[in-house]
Image: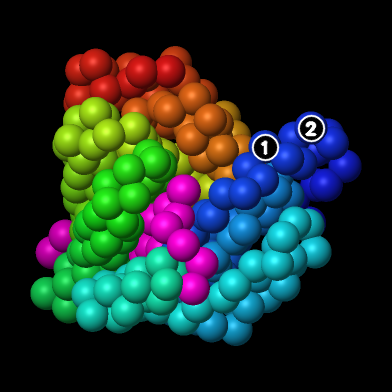
Amino acid sequence: RAVTGARVSAAERREFEGSLVVVTGAGSGIGRATALAFAERGAQVVAADIDLETAEQTAALAGRLGPAARAFRVDVSDAAAMERFAGTVARELGVPDVVVNNAGVGVAGAFLDHSTDDWRRVLDVNLWGVVHGCRLFAAQMVARGQGGHIVNIASAAAYTPSGALPAYATSKAAVLMLSECLRGELAGRGIGVSAICPGIVDTGITRASRFVGMGDDGQERLRERAARAYRLRGYGPDKVALRILAAVRHDRAVVPVTPEAHLGRMLSRVSPGAMRL
Ligand code: ADP
């Protein structure tokens, strides 16, 4: 089960009542768990994914937990498609209160084995997708003048150098910096921007099919490394979703989703002052 309804109290069920929440990459993993967590707390959810079928499944699940949800097919890397998507949302549902730019892809392998296409694919989705989502929806929020919150899913890979995921880690480092720049720009307008930095989470993206080039062996090694580094196993998307909700609730800038002492050390090395927990 992606979200346990039993843990949510009657008061919590109303926390995001009346809010419109857009989640990209909502068809699986962190995106789906986030969509359901918001729905369960009263939000109307827009589940967007390049895979319409999974987005529709998420919307159906969300509708059972909270208000009726909508599903859209959109490729976040496609500027024109994102513009149409953002326009449709504003016209039909209104300006979102929360946008979670979560859609992502990964390519596993050494830098010298990454092709130009590998780099393009990862940067197109992970970086440009976030740029489009931020620009289009921030503009709507600014025009409306009632604040809002943008959550970008970065990664612990953004500040943890690794030879295994150079394009992915680079794309996530860019998302982290973009989020911090935008946070400063929008601060005066009541629009919060958060970057979430999950460690290794057991979702679709850690399956061989998502990290192109990573076989079962590679996946197992990744899990073992995660367990050693973070002393975590079976770390699921639900936990990340709860950290996303908390980031919105408390307007956090950068949210590592792994034991904080460990990541705090790494964060302070890479980006002093970045961690405001
Ligand atoms: P995680 O939850 O760890 O981010 P997943 O692979 O489970 O990993 O989820 C990523 C989601 O993003 C998938 O549902 C996938 O279909 C979606 N996605 C991937 N590329 C795009 C894209 N270009 N546009 C929209 N959604 C995308």
Q: Is residue 171 left or right of residue 224?
A: left
Residue 169 seen in the figure? no
Q: Under tag 1, what secondary structure?
A: loop
- Residue 86 location (% of width, % of height): 36, 69
Q: CA distance from mark 2 to mark 1?
A: 7 Å
Q: Are discs 2 and 1 less than 8 Å apart at CB?
A: yes
Q: Residue furthest right?
A: 6
Relative to 100, does residue 83 appear above or below in the rendering?
below
Which residue is nearer to you in this view: 211 or 82? 82
In the rendered image, the quadrant that contains the N terminus is: bottom right
Q: Which residues are magenta?
A: 92-113
At 67% across and 37% down in the image, what residue appears?
A: 15
In the rendered image, the quadrant that contains the C terminus is: top left
Q: Quadrant of residue 24?
A: bottom left
Q: Is residue 165 left or right of residue 260?
A: left
At 58% across and 44% down in the image, what residue appears?
A: 241
At 36% across and 18% down in the image, what residue appears?
A: 276
Relative to 251, does residue 39 appear above or below in the rendering?
below
Q: Is residue 198 left or right of residue 270?
A: right
Q: Which residue is mark 2?
A: 11
Say whether residue 112 is magenta.
Answer: yes
- Per the rendering, the mark at residue 15 is 1
Which residue is nearer to you in this view: 158 or 16? 16
- Per the rendering, the mark at residue 270 is none
- Residue 33 location (% of width, % of height): 63, 54
At 60% across and 84% down in the image, what residue appears?
A: 53
Say whether residue 55 is magenta.
Answer: no
- Residue 243 location (% of width, % of height): 55, 35
